[in-house]
Amino acid sequence: MKKLICMVLFSMLASPAFAQDRYIADKLFTYMHSGPSNQYRIIGSIDAGEKVQLVSTNKESDYSEVVDSRGRRGWVESRFVTRDISMAVRLPQLEKELAQVKSQLANARQSADSEKAGLVESLDVRNQQIAQLEQNYGEISKQLTASQTEIRELRAKLDTQKEDLLLKYFTYGGGVAGIGLLLGLILPHIIPRRKRNPAGWA
């Protein structure tokens, strides 16, 4: 009896400053006893995942003294007290992180869609520019072909005119030469010769 009283007094005098955060294991509904064994009366229950303050541990009975969120002090089996954050606490954190990730993903997707739209628009503009350049190139090619054809025609015409001019020159030259020859042959017969003076003078 004295031992029990001493243990209760010790547990009451234990400084809360040494209390450590712990969690009741998930998927569990456990009773809180007034002492470090199931022989002590039940003073309440603790739900799975509830955060508690670990005050002390009785290694002989393998029970831990805890203080729950309502300020109740009692003993539970040590195997039900864990350092791992319970799912009841982690789930809201995970949901919050998931919401943040979804928001970031939505922003990234929106940014990607916006960038994609910009690239598509830029590509359309480039395609239009390329089509315009190809059209201009086609027109220039046609103009160049027409110019080359016209140049060839003009050269051929010029060559023909040169040949005609040379032929005219030869014709005129031949005519002049022929006329001169005829005149040279005919004129002496037409124009009477002057009789020579016996003295040697005409």
Image: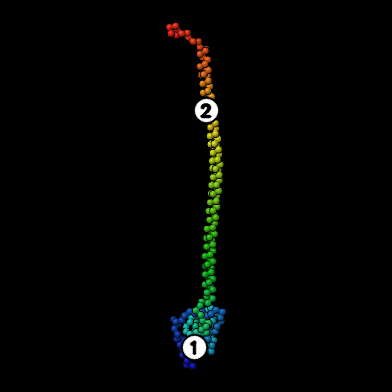
Q: Is residue 116 above or below residue 60?
A: above
Indicate the secondary structure of the residue bearing disc 1.
loop
Pointer 2 or 1: first along the chain: 1
Closer to the camera, 113 or 147?
Answer: 147
Residue 60, numbered label: 1
Mark 2 or 1: the one toward you? 2
Quarter containing the C terminus: top left
Q: Are marks 2 and 1 in contact (CB under 8 Å)?
A: no
**Nearer-the-camera pick, 105 or 173:** 173
Amino acid under disc 2: Leu
Residue under label 2: 166
Residue placed at 50% from the left, 12% from the top?
191
| Residue at 51% from the left image edge and 81% from the top image edge | 81
Q: Is residue 98 visible?
A: yes
| Figure check: 22 above or below 98 | below
Identify which residue, 61 or 199, lies in the foreground: 199
Residue 74 location, x and y as percent? 51, 85
Q: Which element is circle 2 on? A: helix
Q: As drawn, which residue projects farthest toward the top?
A: 198
